[in-house]
Every structure is written in structure tokens, then in C-alpha cells.
Amino acid sequence: MNRTNPERKAIVTGVTGQDGAYLVQLLLDKGYAVFGTYRRTSSVNFWRLAELGIERHPNLTLVEHDLTDLGSTLRLLEAAQASELYNLAAQSFVGVSFEQPTTTASVTGLGALNLLEAIRVIDPDIRYYQASTSEMFGKVQAIPQTESTAFYPRSPYGVAKLFAHWTTINYRESYGLFGSCGILFNHESPLRGIEFVTRKISDAVARIKLGKLDILELGNLDAKRDWGYAREYVEGMWRMLQVDEPDTYVLATQRTETVRDFVRMAFAAAGYQLEWSGKAEHERGIDVATGKVLVQVNPKFYRPAEVDLLIGCADKAKDKLGWQPHTTLEALCRMMVEADLARLSA
Ligand code: NDP
Ligand code: GDR
């Protein structure tokens, strides 16, 4: 890889996460110099960047930064001299936000405010992307959800993201900043964090297939999600900052399935046929060929308040950005199971 003397510079917060890794790869491929931020921990893990083969790319500068620290945020912007800033860092796990609401509000909500304040002070021309979320729709007020659907968050995470979302719009309207919000519905990939349900499932299916696990335990199987492929969604983020005006866009597939269906698809990708028996916390997924129980519900994974059904309409993104998803849920699920089988067999 040769340094290409890039003219465009971007900051991406949260490069140790799923979207951060894919977005950094996309920006590097487009010739950007990227400042990717990660927070200090006792053992930083760049496994996603390594899997994509970009951990040591000459145009990638990895910078220590904590979203909750305004001073560190000001110094980041001053040092990078970037023209685009993608704020992907967050305490992003909904379940944990019920246990750690203050941390979630601080990182996911106030962290975005710190970045916007820093832009205001250091360089108001920086284009800002806010990672907003379908979790803001929560107890949904319309089907499908669009940019104009009313919000009703159901978790401390959703509330914190709504703060960041409205702050971005407020800075757009108050100070003329170029702040765009992508209301992204769930997007998954082989790089998805293991605590999220799709990857928890694909990893468990691979382990069961390889004889390393007996049973997959899950919470609410009835929740419905609109799941897309993360690599395609980061392309949408980039497009949002390339148009003339800042705006808000939904990215979604407009297809919704239950967690139960995703489980069935994932087992099918590994050659199993599941049948379901029982109800609610007594529900089981049984291997038709052997009669073995492979899936069971454990109420410890239930949430205090649930988002029952998400399905998004991305017509505006298609119309204004030329963005649309291509990967089917079946193909995505297969990709994830195959990646986990390969990892665990290596
Ligand atoms: P991940 O959880 O994979 O990544 C989150 C990133 O934020 C990690 O790099 C994490 O670092 C970092 N982070 C957490 N706390 C801090 C902090 N205090 N300071 C600096 N960095 C921090 O999320 P995704 O990649 O899946 O999502 C990217 C963004 O998009 C998030 O904001 C998420 O809320 C949002 N979003 C995601 C959707 C999805 O379906 N994936 C849908 C809609 C929105 P570390 O590795 O050290 O924990
Ligand atoms: P979500 O994703 O909460 O939609 O947030 P997650 O994969 O965690 O949950 C999806 C649904 O599955 C149900 N579920 C389980 N979830 C987990 N994690 N573990 C389980 O064992 C389990 N069993 C059932 C959940 O109750 C839920 O209904 C993700 C995150 O990426 C957010 O950051 C992002 O904003 C939204 O997607 C859009």
C-alpha cells in the first residue's frame, strides 16, 4: 500500500467498532487520509482493522481519544485538520444502557455535543455525521418508519441518541454547521460485536456445529428487526456528507423478521432444520434430525422495555443519495455463519 498524498482528511470516531472498521476501509479506498480514534483501555483491540488488512495502512493514523473529554476532542480536531468527521463512537449496546444509563448518556449523548462544540470552536466548515438510530423510534408510531415518524425511545441508549440527534439538528439550524444524521436501522456483518443478537447467534451456531457448545440461550424471540449489511450502510454515511446540504436520512431494507426467524436461517446455513415447541420462556428450538434441544429461552436476556418492531423506509436516501441496500438477509446470515465457522476452525 502506497501513501497517495491524499487531499481529503476525515476523522472517524470508534474505529475499533464494526462500522468504524468498514468506514475507515471505504475512506482509505477513496484516497482519504483517516484519523481513526480509539479510547484508552488496558488492552486495545484492533482485530476488525486487522481482519480488513488496514491496521497498518500508511494513510491511517490511530489516535487515542475519549468522547467524554472536551479537551481531548478539541486537540483531536486541531491536530487532524480534517474536512469530515464521522461520529460512530458510542456505548452502543441497548441492554447495557439499562445497567449503565449515566455512562451511556455521557458517551452516547454528551460525547456528540462535545464534538459539535469542538467543530464550532475549531473549524465550523467541518462536515459532521451523527450515527443516529432506529432505536429512537422505540415504541413505533407508524409503519414503516421514515424521517418524519415521531420518536418514542424505549431505552437509556435510545434517549441518549435522541439527544445527540436533536443536538446535531440544533447546531445545523443555530450555527449553520453541516451536521447530517443517518437514522440507521440494524446492520450486521461478520465484524458485528458478539453481544448483539445476530452475531451471538452466528457464533453459537458455528460452535454447536463444531461440537464446542450444546445450547444457544436467547431472550425475546418475538422482537422484529430490519437487518441490513453494515458494509453497504457505511457507504450511505459517506454519501450523506457528499451532497450540498446537511439533512437526515433513514437507511433500512424495508423488510422485518423476528429473532426466531434469524435463528432458523442461521441454523439452516449450517445444515440444521429447527422446529419450535413451547411458548414464551419455555420455547425451545429442536433439531428435527436428532430431536436435540439446540435453542432455549433464558429470561435473563429480556430487557426492561423492548422495541417490538422496526421496519424502515429508505426512499429518501434512494432518491437524494442514490443509496439502496442489495444484500438479502439470507445472504447476510450465511456470510456471518460461514465467517464464524472459518474463525473457529482456524
Ligand atoms: P460498536 O459497538 O461496534 O462500536 C462502538 C465504538 O465506540 C467502539 O469503537 C467503542 O470502543 C467506541 N466507544 C465506546 N465508548 C467510547 C468512549 N467513551 N470514547 C471513545 N470511543 C468509545 O458499534 P457499531 O459499529 O455497530 O455502531 C457504530 C455507531 O452507529 C454507534 O454509535 C451505534 O450506536 C450506531 N448505530 C449502530 C447500528 C447498528 O446496527 N450497528 C444502527 C444504528 C446506529 P471500544 O471498542 O473500546 O468499546
Ligand atoms: P438492538 O440489537 O437492541 O436492536 O440494537 P440487539 O442485537 O442487541 O437486539 C436485537 C433484538 O434481539 C433481542 N434479543 C437479544 N438481544 C441480544 N443482544 N442478546 C440476546 O440474547 C437476545 N435475545 C433476544 C433483543 O431483545 C432485541 O429485541 C442494535 C445496536 O447496534 C444499537 O447500537 C443500534 O442503534 C440498533 O441496533 C439499531
Image (spheres, helix red, strand yellow):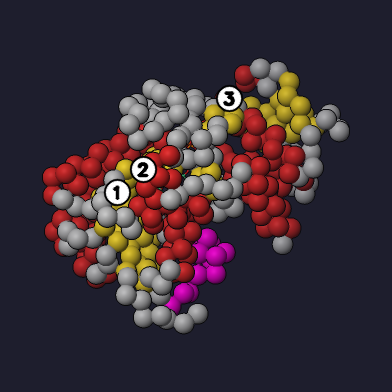
Q: Secondary structure at mark 2?
A: strand
Where residue 227 sits, quadrant-wise, is top right
User: Can you give x and y, in whole percent of width and height, for residue 132 in the image?
Assistant: 36, 42
Residue at the spot x=47%, y=65% of the render? 25
Label 3 or label 1, whichever lies nearer to me, is 1
* Residue type indicated by callout 2: Tyr
Mark 1 vs ligand 1: CB below 8 Å: no
Residue 249 badge: 2
Q: Which residue is identified by label 1?
A: 180
Q: Secondary structure at mark 1?
A: strand
Label 2 with label 1: CB-CB less than 8 Å = yes
Q: Quadrant of the C terminus?
A: bottom right
| Nearer to the camera, 142 or 86 | 142
Q: Residue furthest right?
A: 289
User: Can you give x and y, in whole percent of width and height, for residue 322 in the image?
Assistant: 43, 50
Residue 304 to residue 113: above or below = above
Q: Which residue is identified by label 3?
A: 222
Stretch of the chain drawn in magenta: 46-58
Q: Is 56 contained in the magenta span?
A: yes
Where residue 251 sits, quadrant-wise, is top left
Residue at the spot x=65%, y=47% of the render? 331
State the CA–CA distance, disc 2 to disc 3. Answer: 27 Å
Determine crowd level at label 2: few under 14, some 14-19, many 20+ residues with C-alpha closer than 10 A. many
Label 2 with label 3: CB-CB less than 8 Å = no
